[in-house]
Image: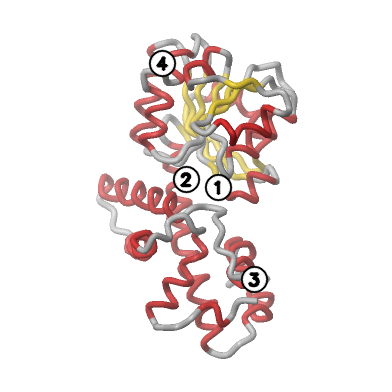
């Protein structure tokens, strides 16, 4: 470990709890905050300190990581009255690992600079499994010196780390990744549904396809969950809709037309409207089956 940086962590959800746990296991002193305190108990039980506000986390930390749900949450915990930048001392770093707006990341970086601090935007991909196994991919935007200082922490959470550029570029890299995932999820679900309706043994078919050019990480992980009828969230549909919305916002800003993202957004919004936003993104197969009046459960074991 490079030094004994005091680490602050805000957000202990599906991914954040595991990520913070890796830093704690590496020996960094940890102060934590989450809207629901009970979700921090595994960290507190191992010696982490509790803080009542994001500001209090920052007052006890040299580097503060945040991973929360939506851009308005990022703004509140970072720039709000009791936010991180109200308590972070000069020389400190705030590192947002949520998937959020590139424009907001630029605003946070500017605000941090004004008080002698640095800001990194470092969203991740890899889902709950990647977070648990410390195999996340991390897209980082911000000052290079700040990136180098935080890199030992990133190395405890992920295996693929890229400094994409200045403030906001981590978010841009992650949104491009979400555009890729949008297409892969549609193709994976459509291929499974086609195989089922064609009368194939879908499980055996998948083992052949996943090892070849038609395979993907999504098929190998979420596809296996689909075959069990397991739609528990490794990544919430509600959160994916947020990400797709951010992608579409950037597309409008860049005057870029990407029909695949638009289609994925529409399909997932159908599911959200039916109260299915808390399911995992792999539940898209149910939506596609319903469009043809089919029953995906005929394939599940």
Q: Is residue 179 above or below residue 65?
A: below
CB under 8 Å between callouts 4 and 2?
no
CA gap between label 1 and label 3 equals 20 Å
Q: Which residue is mark 2?
A: 174
Q: Which residue is mark 1?
A: 125
Q: Reading the chain from its start, which is encountered first: label 1 or label 4?
A: 4
- The answer to whether residue 265 is seen in the rendering is no
CA gap between label 4 and label 2 equals 23 Å
Instruction: Find residue 39 and report its horizontal and vertical position in percent.
Output: 59, 36
Question: Which quadrant is the N terminus positioned in?
Answer: top right
Q: Which residue is mark 4?
A: 113
- Disc 1 residue crowd, few under 14, some 14–19, many 20+, Cα 10 Å: many
Q: Reading the chain from its start, which is encountered first: label 3 or label 2?
A: 2
Instruction: Find residue 130 and report its horizontal and vertical position in percent.
Output: 64, 48
Q: Reading the chain from its start, which is encountered first: label 4 or label 3?
A: 4
CA gap between label 4 and label 3 equals 47 Å
CA gap between label 1 and label 4 equals 27 Å
CA gap between label 3 and label 2 equals 24 Å
For image coordinates 38% across by 13% down, the residue present is 114
How many numbered markers are drawn?
Answer: 4
Residue 210's disc number: 3
Question: Which quadrant is the C terminus positioned in?
Answer: bottom right
Instruction: Find residue 81 and report its horizontal and vertical position in percent.
Output: 36, 18
Residue 32 in the figure: left or right of residue 35? right
Instruction: Find residue 155 and report its horizontal and vertical position in percent.
Output: 67, 34
Q: Residue furthest bottom?
A: 199
> Which of the two residues, 123 or 142, is positioned nearer the viewer here?
123
CB under 8 Å between callouts 2 and 1?
yes
Q: Quadrant of residue 132?
A: top right
**Of discs 1 and 4, which sits in the foreground?**
1
């Amino acid at each position: 470990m490079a030094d004994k940086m005091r680490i602050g962590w805000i957000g202990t959800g599906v991914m954040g709890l595991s990520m913070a746990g890796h830093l704690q296991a590496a020996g960094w002193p940890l102060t934590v905050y989450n809207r629901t305190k009970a979700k921090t108990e595994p960290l507190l039980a191992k010696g982490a300190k509790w803080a009542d506000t994001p500001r209090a986390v920052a007052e006890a930390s040299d580097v503060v990581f945040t991973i929360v749900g939506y851009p308005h949450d990022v703004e509140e915990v970072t720039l709000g009255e009791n936010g991180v930048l109200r308590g972070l001392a000069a020389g400190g770093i705030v590192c947002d690992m949520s998937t959020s707006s590139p424009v907001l990341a630029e605003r946070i970086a500017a605000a941090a600079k004004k008080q002698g601090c640095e800001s990194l935007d470092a969203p991740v991909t890899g889902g709950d499994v990647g977070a648990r196994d410390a195999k996340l991919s991390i897209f980082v935007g911000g000052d290079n010196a700040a990136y180098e200082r935080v890199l030992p922490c990133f190395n405890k959470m992920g295996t693929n780390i890229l400094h994409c550029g200045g403030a906001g570029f981590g978010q841009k890299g992650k949104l491009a990744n979400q555009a890729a995932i949008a297409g892969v999820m549609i193709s994976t679900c459509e291929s499974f549904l086609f195989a089922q309706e064609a009368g194939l043994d879908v499980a055996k078919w998948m083992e052949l396809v996943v090892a070849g050019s038609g395979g993907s990480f999504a098929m190998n992980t979420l596809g296996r969950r689909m075959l069990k009828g397991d739609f528990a969230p490794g990544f919430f549909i509600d959160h994916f809709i947020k990400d797709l919305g951010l992608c579409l916002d950037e597309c409008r800003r860049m005057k870029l037309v990407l029909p695949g993202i638009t289609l994925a957004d529409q399909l997932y919004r159908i599911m959200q409207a039916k109260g299915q936003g808390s399911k995992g993104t792999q539940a898209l197969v149910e939506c596609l089956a319903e469009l043809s009046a089919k029953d995906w459960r005929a394939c599940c074991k």
